Image (spheres, rainbow, N blue to C red):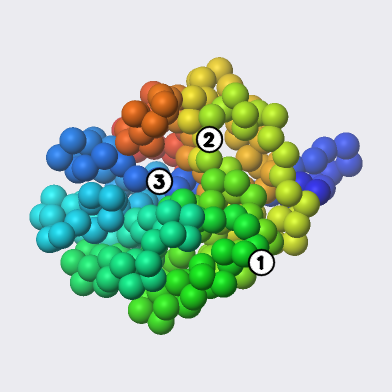
Amino acid sequence: MPHLTSTTAGTTTTGLDMALGIPGYAHPLVAPLEWGELTRPGTPVHWAVLNVSGGPGIRPDPHCLEAAGRLTNAGVRVLGHLDVTYGARPHGELISEAHRYLDWYRVDGFFLDRCPTERAALPEIRRITTTLRALLAPGHIVLGHGAHPYPGYAENGDQLVTYSGPWSEYRWSQVAEWTADYPPERFCHFVHGVPRRHLEEALRIARWQGAGTIWFTDRYGRGGRTDPWESLPGYWDEIVSRIGPGVSE
């Protein structure tokens, strides 16, 4: 069932406070506006993923270090990007990358991209998250499934990305029943190709399905050649004003 609460007779609302999760902008040199907007007063951001070069890179990047520092000073969580490749990456490689993120950028947690969904892969993900939590103490871990995983994954991540994909599919999507056992702040939805005229509808779907962290954009991913998350949506100010306390002009 969706995460709903009744207020007055004949009305239904979610009672859900939403905020933004940033899957990962382009490099700060390429997207300075995008990184700068995240520290703008009144911008409701739960966290932002720092992806230097498919991970932390081979040496500290001064531009990424500056961007991460500004976010931290503004009270925004910075998450290091770890590509688990559906469970295929060696454990040691991932932990080595995690150490570099912590040593170089002082991240507040990790985003496990391409996280598997099946039950058989759960023990390895549990092993990874247990190791990361020992390093973070405390920290925030987001499992980037992109679809509803086996329910046991919910015990290993602070948040789960249960949808990542195009608006054409999201508008007809259905929530897994087991998610109703958890509060909305446990779930994230990333949707690209959302036209401005459908933004309110997309927000209603997210609330109905119980997603507390979202990222909606009118950008498109084209055949894997274009990353729709790299830049701001064309309706940035509108989406910030709809879910946050307002935008400072």
Image disc number at residue 165 = 2
The answer, for residue 42, to whether it is visible in the render is no
Image disc number at residue 90 = none
Q: Earlier in the sequence, mark 3 or mark 2?
A: 3
Q: Residue furthest top?
A: 197
Instruction: Judge by depth and name the residue closer to the eye, 180 or 14.
Output: 180
Q: Is residue 126 left or right of residue 232?
A: right
CB-based contact (under 8 Å), mark 2 and mark 1: no
Q: Earlier in the sequence, mark 3 or mark 1?
A: 3
Can you identify the residue that label 1 sits on? Answer: 152
Callout 3 amino acid: Pro
Residue 114 location in percent, x, y? Answer: 46, 51
Image disc number at residue 23 = 3
CA distance separating discs 3 and 2:
12 Å
Q: Across the whole image, how many numbered discs are drawn on residues?
A: 3
Residue under the point 18% across and 35% down: 30
The answer, for residue 124, to whether it is visible in the render is yes
Instruction: Count neighbours of disc 3 (C-alpha within 10 A) and say few if under 14, some if 14 to 19, many if 20 or more.
Output: many
